[in-house]
Structures are given as C-alpha cells and as structure tokens.
Image (cartoon, coloured by chain):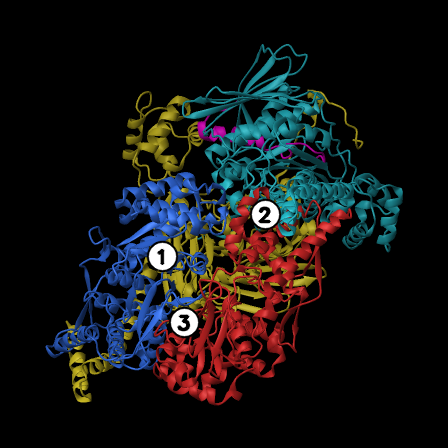
Chain colours: A blue, B red, C cyan, D yellow
Amino acid sequence: MTVQPANHGATDIDRRTLAVIESVARQVAAAIAAGELPEIALPRRGLANVRYDADKGYFELGEARKTRRLTAGTARIFAQTLRLMAVSRQLVADGDFATKREAYYVAKNWGVCRFGDQAESDAVMDDIEALASMYGLSREQLRFHPESHGGAVAGPLTVIDRGAVPGETIEIDCAALGSGAYSIPHSVEHLQFRTKARFILAIETGGMFQRLNNHRFWREANGILVELGGVPTRATRRFIRRLSDDCRLPVYCFTDCDPYGFANIYRTLKVGSGNAAHISPLFCVPKARFLGVTPKDIVDYDLGDATHPLSRVDEKRARDALANDPFFRRHRRWVAAIESLLKMGVRAEQQALAKWGLNYVIEKYLPRKLADRRSFLP
Amino acid sequence: MTVQPANHGATDIDRRTLAVIESVARQVAAAIAAGELPEIALPRRGLANVRYDADKGYFELGEARKTRRLTAGTARIFAQTLRLMAVSRQLVADGDFATKREAYYVAKNWGVCRFGDQAESDAVMDDIEALASMYGLSREQLRFHPESHGGAVAGPLTVIDRGAVPGETIEIDCAALGSGAYSIPHSVEHLQFRTKARFILAIETGGMFQRLNNHRFWREANGILVELGGVPTRATRRFIRRLSDDCRLPVYCFTDCDPYGFANIYRTLKVGSGNAAHISPLFCVPKARFLGVTPKDIVDYDLGDATHPLSRVDEKRARDALANDPFFRRHRRWVAAIESLLKMGVRAEQQALAKWGLNYVIEKYLPRKLADRRSFLP
Amino acid sequence: MPEGDATHPTAFEMAARQRAISVSEFFLKNRHLLGFDSQSKAVVTTVREAVDNALDACEEAGILPEIAVEISRRGAALRVAVEDNGPGIVEGQIGRIFGKLLYGSRFHKLSQSRGQQGMGISAAGMYGQLTTGLPMHIISRIAGEAQAAELHVSIDTSRNRPDIHRKRHLDWDRPHGTRVEVEIEGRYQRGPHSVESYLKQTAIANPHVTLALRDPDGVEIRFQRSVETLPPLPSEIRPHPHGVELGQLIQMLSDADARTLRQFLERAFSRVGRKTADAIIERASAGLSARSYPRRIAHAEATRLHRAIAGTRISGPRTDCLAPIGEERLLEGLRKEIDASFYTVLTRRPAVYRGNPFQVEVGLAHGKPGRPYLEADDGSTRRRKRRGDREQPAQAADLPGRSDEPVRLLRFANRVPLLYQQPACAITRAATQINWRSYGLRQPKGGLPLAPMVMLVHVASVWVPFTSESKEAVASYPEILRELKLGLQDCGRRLARYLRRDRALRLAEAQRSRIETYLPHVGIALQEILEIGDAERERTVAALDAVLRRQRKI
Amino acid sequence: MPEGDATHPTAFEMAARQRAISVSEFFLKNRHLLGFDSQSKAVVTTVREAVDNALDACEEAGILPEIAVEISRRGAALRVAVEDNGPGIVEGQIGRIFGKLLYGSRFHKLSQSRGQQGMGISAAGMYGQLTTGLPMHIISRIAGEAQAAELHVSIDTSRNRPDIHRKRHLDWDRPHGTRVEVEIEGRYQRGPHSVESYLKQTAIANPHVTLALRDPDGVEIRFQRSVETLPPLPSEIRPHPHGVELGQLIQMLSDADARTLRQFLERAFSRVGRKTADAIIERASAGLSARSYPRRIAHAEATRLHRAIAGTRISGPRTDCLAPIGEERLLEGLRKEIDASFYTVLTRRPAVYRGNPFQVEVGLAHGKPGRPYLEADDGSTRRRKRRGDREQPAQAADLPGRSDEPVRLLRFANRVPLLYQQPACAITRAATQINWRSYGLRQPKGGLPLAPMVMLVHVASVWVPFTSESKEAVASYPEILRELKLGLQDCGRRLARYLRRDRALRLAEAQRSRIETYLPHVGIALQEILEIGDAERERTVAALDAVLRRQRKI
C-alpha cells in the first residue's frame, strides 16, 4: 500500500471530468452551427431502465437513453442543464466544490433561469450525474458534494488526506482518537489508506459503534469499525467501497435483525438501490457479507423475549423483498432467512444482545461469529 | 491549560455518583425498617416547574418535587426506578456505560419488571437524571449515554482523551484531520482540551461546516469549527459548554435566518429548553452569541431574491417566541429582529450567501462579521 | 281529445276542465310515498302493514297476539299471507278496510296505536293490484260465528271505493281471526332491511307477541312470547290546550256545542277544569267572559284567547293515554333476543309536542358475554389495533356488533320497528348529537358511537309525526329531540357507571397481584445497591409486604 | 266518550268506530309533507304555489306572464299577495280551486305543467287558516267582464270542501287577472333558500316572464323578460304502452269502450297504430286475436298481453307533449341573469320512464369575466393554496361561485326551481356520480365538482316524479338518472373542449415567450464551458433562434 501525494491541481480524473463536460457543449454548438436542433442524450433513470447484474452483483442502469432536445417545451431545463454543467466545470477548474443546496443558490443569479425549488435543481443534477456515470465519474467528481458527511470510523487505519497547502499530506490514525472517532468527509475521492486490519465491520447503530469503540474491540479483532447510522450516506458507502477495494478487505455488515436492516441498509450498501442505479458501479460494495443479527441468531442466542412484533410496514417490506427484489430472490439462503423471520413474526435489534449483559456482544457474540464466517449470509 | 491523566478507576465525580445512588437506597431501606412506606423525592419535570433564570441565563428546574411513594399503583415504577439506579451503580463501578436503548434491553432480564417499551424506560431514566441533576450530575455521569454522538469538529484544538490502557492518554489534533473531522463522542465528560483559538464557531449545517473546513477557514480566523447539524445533540452541547468553560472561549452561532435557527437551534444551545430544564445547568452555553444570518443581513447583503417565504409553521414559531419565550422577550434586540423577519415574510439560509459566489461567506461575510462583534445578537 | 292539439282555451274552457282527484289515484301515481319504491321494500312494507293491523286488533280485543307470516313464490310474483288470532272483522267492513284509502278507526282519535292513517294495508292491496292485477284475498271469522267470511277485494281507484269480487262463507279451523293474502311483484331479501329483521325487532319491543315466519325457501323461524299478559290498553284523550293553534281554536269554537266559553274549554280540552278555564278567561280579559257564547267569538277575541291559553300554566297531558312498553317488558324483550353483558332500560315521563302527548323509551344492551370489550390498560394502541384488524367481519344483523363498528340503532314508533331512512330520523339525530365520549365510548365526529351495543329507542305517541306516509322516520320536533336526548343521556350515564365499575373491579384485582409481583424487585435493587445478603433482602421484602398490607387495610 | 275508559271492545264495537278520513284532515296533520315544516320555508312554498299557478294559467291562455309578488308584515304574521295578468278564474270555480285539496285540471291529463296535483295553493290557504285563522282573499276578473269577483275562502277540512265567507263584485283596474292574498305565520329570510332566489331562478328558466318582488322592507326587485314570445303550449297525450303495468292494463281493459282488442290498443295508447297493435297481438298469441273483446280478456291472457307489449318495438312517445325551455331560450335566460365567460346549453331528446315521456335540459355557465380561472402552470401548489386561503369568502348566492367551491347547482322541474332537499334529488345524484375530473374540473370524492360554475338542470315531464308532495326533489328512476348523466356529460365534454382550447392558447403564448427567455442562457453556458467570446456567443444564440423558428413553422 502506497501513499500518493494529494494534488490541488488538475488530476487525471479531473481532466476526464472536464473532457466530458466540454464534449457535451461542443456537440450542442456543432448542432446549432449545422442548423439542427441541439440535443443531449441522458440515460433514463426510471426503474424500467434498471436491471440487477448478478455477475457484478449490483443494480445497474440499462442502455435506454432519453434525448433532451431543445424545443420550446424544454428550453428552460435544457438551459439549466448546460448552465449547471458550466458550474461543475468551474468548480473542477478552481479545485472547489458545492453542495446540492449551494448549487441551488448559485443559480439564484441566473435570472429567469433560476430553479423554482431545490427539487428542480436536484433533478437536473441527477441527470448530469447519470450522464457522468456513463464515463465512470461520480457526482463528487463533478464537485457536487452531498449535504451530509459520512459516519464515524475507528480502528487500525491510517487515512491519508491532503493538507492545507498543495502537496502537503496529512495522516490520521483512526486508532488514536480515544473515545472519539474519525468523521468521514463529504467527499472521499482524494483519500488514501494504510492499514493492517483484516476486515471492515459496518455497524448499523451509533450506540453499538460507541460500545465497540470504547472497549477497543477493533484492537482484539483487528478490524476497522465504520458506523453506518441507518441507511449509509453516499460518503460512507463510497468510503467503504474505496477502502475495501484499495486494501482488499472483506466487509462484514452488522445490523438489526429486521427487514429494514436487511433490505434497506445491507442491500443498499451491497448492491445499491433501483432508483439510484446510475451510481451503483461506484458506490455499492459487492464484497459485503451479512454478519448478523440473523433470524437464526434469535433462536441460537435465545433472544425471543427481547424481540418486538413485526409491524405491518416490516411485513410488507419483507414480502416485497421476497417477491420483487432480484438480489434476495437470487440467494436461497436469504429467502430462507426472510421467510423464517416472517414466520417468527418478530424483529430483534443489535441491542437485544444486551439482554445477556452489556458486553456480551464483545465477549461472546462477535468472536463466535467472526470465527465461523460461513454462517454469514451472502 | 493542563492535561490531567485519564483514569478508569473511581474518580471524585464517580464517587459522588455512587453516593447519591446509595443514599436513596439507604433511605428506602430505613423507611421499610421503620415500618413506613418508602418514598423517593424526585424533581417535577413538568413545564409548571420550569423558570427562566435571567441572571444565570438559562431555563432551570424549580423547587417542586413529586414524591414517588411505594403503593400498589406505583409498585412497578418504584421497583423499576430502583433497579435502574442499581444498573447505573454497576456501570460506574465497572467503568462501563449503556445507551438508553441498551438499558432498555438490559431490563429484559427483569421478568415482570421489564419495560413495555423504550418510552417507559426513558421516562424512568429522565426521573433519575433529574434526581442526579439536583447534585450537579448529568446522565452521562450516571453512565447512561445518548444514542447519537456529537457533531464534527475541526480547527486549532487538541482533544485529550483516555487511551485503551488505564493511565494512557491520547491527543487528537483537530487541525490534522484533512478534509475529515473529529467526531464528538457520545460522552465528553472525561475529555480535556488544549487550544490557542480565540473563539468557537457553531455552525448549523454540515454543508457550511464542510466548506469552511475544506477551505481551512479556521486557520485564518483562529477559531474552532463545530458542526451542530440542526438542533445540537446532548453531546455537542456539552462539548461546546465544556470547551468554552475550560478554555474560556466565546461561542458564536451561525445558523439559517429563520425562526427554527433562532428559537430551536440557537436558543436551545444557549439557554436549553423548557422540557429538559433539569439538564440546563450542565448543558446550556450561556456565553453563546448569535453571529448570523440575521434579518438585517438579508437587507445588508441583498439576499432578497435568494429567500423563501415563511411557512405557516415558521410564522407560528416566530409568534410563539415573541409571545411566550422568556429568553427572546427579555432581549429587545431579538424582539426587533424577529418582528422584522415577520414583516419581511421571508427566511434565508446560510447557503443563500452562495448567491454571491460559493466562497463569499469565507472571503467577505464571516470576516466582516467577526470584525464587528457588536452586530451579534445577544 | 286529439293528441297534440294545442290551442289557447278561455277561462271558461279552462274551468270546465277542473276535476276532483281521488286520493287513491293520487297515491297510486305516487306509490313511493307509501313505501313501495323498490321490489324488496314492497315486501317488507306489505308484511309490516298487515302485522301492525293484526297486532292492533288483537290488543284492542284483549287477545294475546299469535301471528303467522308466510311468503311463497307464485311465478314471477310473491304471495304474502298474514294470519292472526284476532277478533275478526265484521263482514260488512271488510271491503272498506281493505279497499279504501284513508279509512280507519284511529285517525280522529288521540290514542296510541300502530296504524293511524287507515292507509297501509289498502295501499299494499293497491300495489298488488297494480303489479299483478289480482285482488286481495281475505278470510275472517268472528268469535261465536259458525263460519268464516271469504272475500276478494280490489280498489276502484278512480272513486277510492272497494270493489268486492267474490264473497262466500266457509268452514275455518280458527275460532276467530283474520287472514290476508296479497300477491305482489317483489323480491325477498335478507339482512338488516328484511322481513326477518322486522319481525325480530317487533318481538323485542313486544315480548307478549308470538310471531312465526315461513320464507319462500320454506325456512321457518319462530319468535316465542316471554310475557303472558297484554300491555295496558292505551285510552283516548282530548287535545291538550298548549298544542292547539289559532286556526284550530277558531274552528273548534265555531263547531262548539257548548253554550258558554267556560264549558267549551272544560269539554274540548284535556287537563282544563273550572279553575284553569277561569284563569284562561281572566287572562284573555276584555270582551270575553266565562259565559261568552263560543260560536259568536270573533277573530280578534279568539286571537287573545289563544294567547291567554299559551300564557296559562296547565298540567301536562294524562299519562294513561300512552302505553309505553314499560321498563320491565323492555328489559325482558332485550334479554330474550339479544345476548349482552349489560342491559339498561328507561321509560321517560310523558311530554307534549304540538298538543300531542308522547313518551320516549330507551334501552341499551352492551357487550357480548365472554368477549371482553374494555380497552383498559392491556397493551399498546398498536396491539389493540392489530387485533381488531384480524377479527372476522361481523354479520350485518349481528346484535350487538363489533367494538369498532357503530352501535346497532333499533328505532321504534308505537312499538313498530322502523327499518328504513335511519339518517332522516329524529332518533338518529338525537343519538348522533350526544357526546358519547363523555360516557366512555369512542365516537367519530357527527356519527353514532362505536361499541358492541344495541341502542333501542321507542317513541310512543297518540300521533307520531312521521316524515312521510311510509312511516319510516320520525320528524325532528324540538320537544321530541329534547326527550330523546335526555333519555339517551340518562342511559349513557348508567352505561358509563357500569363501564367505570367494571374497570375499577379489574383494577383492584390487578393491584393485588401487582404488589406481590413487584416487591421482590425492590428487594433485588436494594441488595445490588447496598450489597446486602440474601437473608437481609428477604427480610426487607417481608417487612415491606407487611407495611403495604397495613396501609391497605386503613 | 269519557277519557281513560279502556275496556276491550268486540269486533262489532270495533267496526262501529271505523270512519273515512278527509284528505284535508290528513294533510293538515301532516303539513310538513306539503312544504310547511318551518316558518321560513312556509313563505317560499306559499309564493311558489301561487306563482306556479299564475304562470300555468297565463301560458295556457296564451298571455305573456307578468307577475307581482308582495310580502308585508301584519302584526306577527306575514301577508303574501301574488297578482297576475292571467285569464282570470270563472267565479263558480274559485271556491274549489282555493278551498279543496286534490282539485285541479292537470292530474288526469298527461301533459307538462307546473302544478300537477291540485294541492299546492289550497294547502297554502289551509296553512294560513291553521296559523292565523284567516281565510284566503281572492280577486279575479275575466277578460270582457265588467267587474272582478272578490271572495274570502277557507277550507272545511273535515269534508275537504270550500267554505266561502264573503263574496262581492268590485271594480278593478286590471282588464283580466287574479290576485291571491293569504296571511300566514312565517319568517322572511334571504340567501339561497329565499323568495328572491326562487324568483331569480324562475326568471332564468322562463325568460319570457316578468317578475316583480316587493319584500317586507319595501325593497323592490324586478326580473324583466328578455323574450317576447311564449313557449309552445305542451299538448296532452295518451300513455305510452311501455310504461303501463300489468294491473293498470287489466283496469284499462275492463274499462274499455273499444269493441276489439286491436281498437283498444290503438285508442288507449300513444304510438300504437294498426301495425303495432297487430304485432303485439301476434306476439301474445294463444287465446287472443285482434278481435277479442277487451272487457272479456281474462287475467292469464292479460298477463301474456302485458309481456307481449314489453317485447314489441314501439316508437318513443311524441315529443310535442313536452315543452322544453329550448336551447335558445335557456341560453338567453342564463346570459340575462348570470355573468360568465363560457355558456353551453343542451336539450336532450325526450325519453320515457314508466310510460311518461320526459326530457332533460342542461346548461353550464363557467368562469367570471375578468377573473381568470385556469390553474395552469403558474407557480407551485403551495403558492396557489395560499392565494386561495386569502380570498374573501363569497356570498352564498354569488353566481357563479369561487373556483374552490362546489358548482352552484340550479335544479328545475317543469320550469319550476327546486330550492330544497338538494341531496335527495336525482339531479344531484347524477351530477355527483359523473367523473368531472375527466372534463378538467377538480372534484372531491362523491361530491359536486369545484369550479366557478353554474350548473342548470331542467327535467320536463308530463308527470315529474317528486320524492314528496312538497315537490322539492326528483325521484331517482334509472331512466331519468341515465338521461341526466348523458346530458351533463355532453355539456361536460363541451366545457372540457373550451377549457382545453383556452389552456392551449395560453400555452402557445407561454411557449413563444419562453424561447426568447431561455436561449441567452444556453449561450452563456456554452460560452462558459467552451471559453468562447461574446461575439461568438451572440452568433450562436441567433443561429439557435433561427433553427427553432424554422422548426416551429414546420
């Protein structure tokens, strides 16, 4: 594992980003010059154009394109699309960035072309993002950063970041933050990593992360702890993906035993989601495995009286997964697990293990689980 | 500023915590021995027993007490109160902690005495917390930690935390985390600080924090940046309070210009809230001042076309503040500010400044503001 | 007259075209007004009119009613037959009773009875005649006569007169009684608006009646009487002065036989004796004296007299003109037909609207035995909701219904169940305007409360004001609404007391076991905090138990 | 009979008590059935009955109606006077017309008219008599007679007979006409259920009528005619065979004067000629021939004949028996009284229910001039909502109303406005069952659409089936519902076309300006990305503009 110097100037990837934007603009200009109606081809983002690629292990955007041709009806959104691409170009050139909200406000100076509300600017941004994804570029590389940063990280990991002056680098030792933790920044594209850990443990709740971190669980287990905080944000997903790719680490996911934990948190982390399929190639973590809490754990660890009945929403979510979700349908073990959960009619939280003592999870549950990785769900 | 060694053994404060718990238990035992119905006196937490202390600058619990006497009707909650205090005692003795959720699950082993749902255990915990607050102890000192950690921190600050082995300490340089940041842990009671900064800037949104951090605004300004992320969590509030007390730093609050920013975020940070008045003495930050965005800024910085109309909820919140909130009512400048906002009928976000360029806030707005601290609202 | 010839006539030509209209013709064209607006409703209306007549006749004659209803298919039509053990009908009257609209014995009387307008059964015959072309078939025998009379009667609608087709005498095994058969176009249906439902409700309000039904599929149902005595016969009264309108008073004065005003007032009205009459006359003052000749009283004086009556305090109308079901019988009827955990009944004191005495009765039957209703303290809202969702949907005629359904409202007027037009009825209006939440029930805004409960309301009156001739809903006179509400509220308070007591009993039970349950945990906590031994813990718990027992005894 | 004496009578004693009931007595007790259930409604009902009679009389006599209504206070009572320029009433008839219920010229005719039951005006008199004790006062003069007749008439309710108090002749400045005065207990009110509202709506449906009102405060309002010709006089018809029921057919056969069945069918029914009659007889087959003697036809054959009639194709009833308002007049009436942006009217072809021809007319008046309605594409939902909140609440009688209020539904039966019982009416039912969303209007579930619109619906028939004698709502016969819906849907489609066209016009306008607005921004973006100069940017924008213009022309 090596450390590359961070760079405020144009990196390769920045040059590719600029090239994509400029080529779109050049095609528009050429069409106008030729006396034709200019158009921009954008991938369709609707669910109809999403498919689950079993080999790659994630949801992917299909081939369908929508052509945004400049007409009276589309004049406004056409102009907005181009202007937002111009903003992106400027941000790359300046080494700066903007949140979605900031981009919305930057457009306030566009006069009649300004966005009515942020939903409007977000939709245009999603179009541009989908376009960029065709060239393997993420929205972060277009320099539009999400509003929220990522979760907390702790354990035997050194993050290598850019310093304040060009060329300078900073190293953050995630094992040296005491009871605190490293907070994943909004964009992680420029980070480098160095670690001797053997795995990444992605944890649903802040409370469980805190327990494992405060008891330095990462030291014994030699794993990196990442707090997901519910459905992981873009930054968290990309961080785990990049860390697991760069350092070739397996990812173990530790969530509540309920359809939300399976289908919303784990499935999103691993294969992405249908309505944001254009970002899957960069954001999903195909090598993630599900450590627990599994429906079988409820029986094995006698958690029956620490469970709660499944709500209607839970049940609906579980049935949806069985009926419609290509990921779960493809894995017989997941189908069996979800069916057994439905049959038990209950859900169990990570904290349910506290029934056997607060540190049972550290002393018994996780060591046993980690010792038998075949028990993980795919 | 000095660094004290962290300590896993019983500190003074831990001994005081144990003493409080044991004295309650001893009074109960004594009453039983005397053939009387045992009782526990708890502060009333209702709004009727809350008053705004203008001198101290925060909401405070009054003198009213409710006496929880053991009868058939109260047997269950009486037993639960004592048992949860026993859990707290054990946690202090072990140097461990539990989240509210974990405490709820620990009680699963209490048989009929278990909690029906977390609302029940939270209420009992709030009672115990109020009791402890009479002795200047927080819930964190009872070793019940909140579920969520605090916001992100960046800038010229070194946090001194306990290491993994007793006696070891860890220093975290919050200026050396690159584009990332230090994530405030769930409990901050044991932290020590070292800094040369001149102020703390508490920032409402993650997006704005990210911008200021990525551009190393803290270096030029020599201030510590803390991300509030909406209404600040307990951990964030306590962190700012302890940091500002220990290092005698002023706190400047930077939020959206809307009633939510004023009344929910800033007011909560500064004076606490009526329905959690028992924690005010430890959690509120009386020396906080409001930097912006102020209603006057909308005019001064010509943000008119980057505003949004006040919603009904906004209007109601503003009128409530004027009519009922002792904090705002006491400060003529706040009354004038809120009235002028209502008159303009609009709200402005921090990001609205991006209308003048993404980094206008760094290059113009904040420097100007910081140069004229009399413009801050009280 | 040739079609389409439209020239303008003169006033004289127009006058020549004026003609009187027979009331039968009128209602034949407007038969929906009489309850014959759909094929299924026509069946229920026909049964109802015949059964009501039979009950009235039996009761008036002092006979415990025993009535058989048979409905059978005749090609595309239905034959409805109703047979009673009543006194029978004098042969010479049969034609007019069944073959003339607005003919009866009750219209001019102020006296409580089921039928009042002399319209119903003839209307059923007219409907049959219109839809199948067949006359009604009547057999009737008077006690002591050797044979029964058999007639086929139809209505000459243009003259509102009976048309008797065949008449003969025959042997009949009944000693006395009447059988009416009519063939109508109709559809037999089940559910809340059915013949069965009508009979069941009749049995509730009339526990002295035995009813038997044989439906078109041959299924037989019997509602057996549980009371062996007849209710008291309501008596006839004169109008109460406070209900008389000016025009009516003027009419009465000009028709008066009495020779003095005082005599007139005493004779024409209920509750007016010499003293009251004098008080009225004195109040009316100038121009009128006790000896004024009634027929000579002018409009202006009559107006003053009318005002004087309104201003004079007069006792309420006699009660014995009304025959409420009575609390005892009402309770009996409810218990007989409805299986519930709690019953309460109430007969209000009589009141007056527009001079007509009326009386309200209310009965509530709440809960199903063995099916706990109370929502108290077991489990969260969520759990309760779920359980409700999974319950089987109840039958519409299920009495009482489910706890998340509106109460079943049974409406009666002069002991007759009202099956249709529930929303238009004063009873419904009163029941929905009351705030049942204060009696511990759930209630959607503007609706009936939700509870596993039957709410029975009876309005008895010498003249029930229906909203239409089909007698399906009671009109909302303020006086009636007021009585209905007071009755319902009173029963509501009793229900609330029951629900509270029931809740309290459960609570006390729960408390006893609660103490025993939770004390050991106080011991465990003290042991953990104070690090005491097991023996001391046991001692502490025992001491605590003793303290608590002592406290509870005081 | 003494009060309270309740012994059980025998069948003979019971028979002796039976009596006929006069129809007047019946309705006097049930006056709410005739529309006199509240003091304010009594005033509107009285005016309505008098005006309807006056209009019928004028039109029948070929006179353009000119009617004055005066309402004044008389102590606690109100005096209602209605005077017309009609043909006058022959003196000998005045008593029965105003003093006898169920007396009139229209009941036995199948012919479209406002009054049909001979009940209304006598009922108003009866109500006045009951509440104030005063008879009706009538003045009437026939064209050519030297003097007018003046009578005071009341009703002898026990015999349903007129009682004439005073009668004299007097000079009257009118050449011909009738004036009716009645004093009643009543309350004059304004708003949607007012005399004024009734008159305004009458003026809309009858643009050939001039109406004047003077209210109790002396305020005068005049609705001037805008059409100077009378509508065609509807003619009388025989019943249509498809509406005759079996019983009715049997009655007609047994009353027949015709000597053969064929002759009977041709004479008794509308639309049956020799060919149709033979077709019916052939279909009825066995036992019946064209020469069968009608009075001898037995029940079984009559049943077959009835079935045969139903199975034979017969042309619809004649149209000239109905006098719809007509599209031209309806449009005139709407324009005269309602200020709107879009009008459409429709007269459906006649149809039949239960043998009675009827005809539906619909008119829509949408939008207020100068107050744009369309909700198209300006601003977010939120903004629109707010604006709505801040609008002033509209007057209830505001025609048309606000865009977020239900349409104003004006219902008419034989040109008479129906003011009460809107929810019970077939017209309302039809209007709410239609999916107006498909015509571009908003519509809450199960309600009327929301739009600034007047929806006028007229049902004309030789016999309008009202749900009660107070003639306030049309009964929901399936055939009538169907016609109502078809009419409303047709007008709905026209409205939708108008709204679409209007929307399209606005859209095209918006597009033109849009292009000009956004093109420069395409230029700016290209300039920023490609780093071109200002001149090249201008050229690009100009080129783009040219491309777009060329595209739009194709």
**Rendering quarter of residue A66:** bottom left
Labels 2 and 1 share a subunit: no
Residue at image mark 3: B206
Contact? badges 2 and 3 (CB < 8 Å): no
Chain part drawn in magenta: C108-136
Instruction: Chain letter for mark 2, please.
Output: C
Instruction: Chain letter for mark 3, please.
Output: B
Number of the label disc, if any, that sits on residue C472 = none
Q: Is mark 3 on a helix, strand or loop?
A: helix
Q: Residues within 10 Å of mark 1 (few under 14, many from 20)?
A: many
D112 or C314: nearer the viewer: C314
Q: Which of marks 3 and 1 is in front?
A: 1
* Distance between the alpha carbons at the discs numbered 2 and 1: 49 Å
- Image coordinates of residue B293 in percent, x first then y, are 47, 80
Number of the label disc, if any, that sits on residue A202 = 1
Left or right of D108? Residue B56 is: right
Q: How many numbered badges does the structure rendering display?
A: 3
Residue at image mark 2: C443
Q: How crowded is mark 3: few (under 14 residues within 10 Å), some or many (20 or more)?
A: many
Q: Which of marks 2 and 3 is in front?
A: 3
Left or right of C383? Residue D347 is: left
- Image coordinates of residue C81 in percent, x first then y, are 53, 22
| Screen quadrant of the N terminus of chain C | top left
Asked whether C133 falls inside the magenta stretch, the response is yes
Labels 3 and 1 share a subunit: no
* Distance between the alpha carbons at the discs numbered 2 and 3: 47 Å
Q: Nearer the viewer, mark 2 or mark 1?
A: 1
Q: Specify the amino acid type for callout 1.
A: Ala
